[in-house]
Amino acid sequence: MPFRHLDLTTLPFEVLEARGLLPEAFAAEFEDYSALKRGLARAVQDALKDRIVRAAEELPNGTVILSGTSALYPVIKFADASRSFDTCLVGSSSRFLGEKGVENSTS
């Protein structure tokens, strides 16, 4: 089965860097963390959705594997963001290891 692996560990930093805001973000983190988090949340969620959609379009009937989702917190909660994936990926479904009906195989 074809698959694509997306490592999300650095996604929030990649979004800031693409917008030219990385140096300012480090300073703003100490000045007004709540404002920084609010401003970054939508951009990270949009970037996440775009990456998943692009990967899924490249692999019709394939699997997109995500790692590093915990690095998105506290900017966004992956569980909340993932609710929109099924609506943007026609004919797909989101499954998580440990979810009922999903085998967690380490072999």
Image (spheres, grey):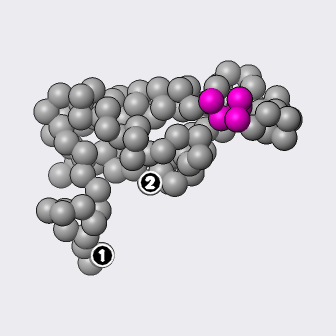
The residue identified by callout 2 is 67
Q: Nearer the viewer, residue 59 or 16?
A: 16
User: Residue 26, percent across and down?
Assistant: 81, 38
Would you say the magenta stretch is mainly helix, strand or loop? helix
- Lateral position of residue 82 relative to residue 59, left or right: right
- Residue 47 seen in this snapshot: no
Whether the magenta-drawn stretch holds residue 90 is answered as: no
Q: Earlier in the sequence, mark 2 or mark 1?
A: 2
User: Residue 51, percent across and down?
Assistant: 42, 32
Q: Name the image quarter holding the C terminus.
A: bottom left
- Lateral position of residue 17 relative to residue 3, left or right: right
48 lies above or below 4: above
55 lies above or below 94: above
Name the image quarter holding residue 14.
Answer: top right
Q: Residues within 10 Å of mark 2 (few under 14, many from 20)?
A: few
Secondary structure under badge 2? strand
Q: Residues within 10 Å of mark 1 (few under 14, many from 20)?
A: few
Q: Nearer the viewer, residue 31 or 99?
A: 31
Q: CA distance from mark 2 to mark 1?
A: 15 Å
User: Residue 53, percent across and down?
Assistant: 33, 30
- Residue 45 seen in this snapshot: yes
Label annotation for residue 106 = 1
At horizontal 44% and vertical 54% (from top left) the residue drawn is: 67
Q: For the magenta stretch, what is the residue range?
A: 34-38
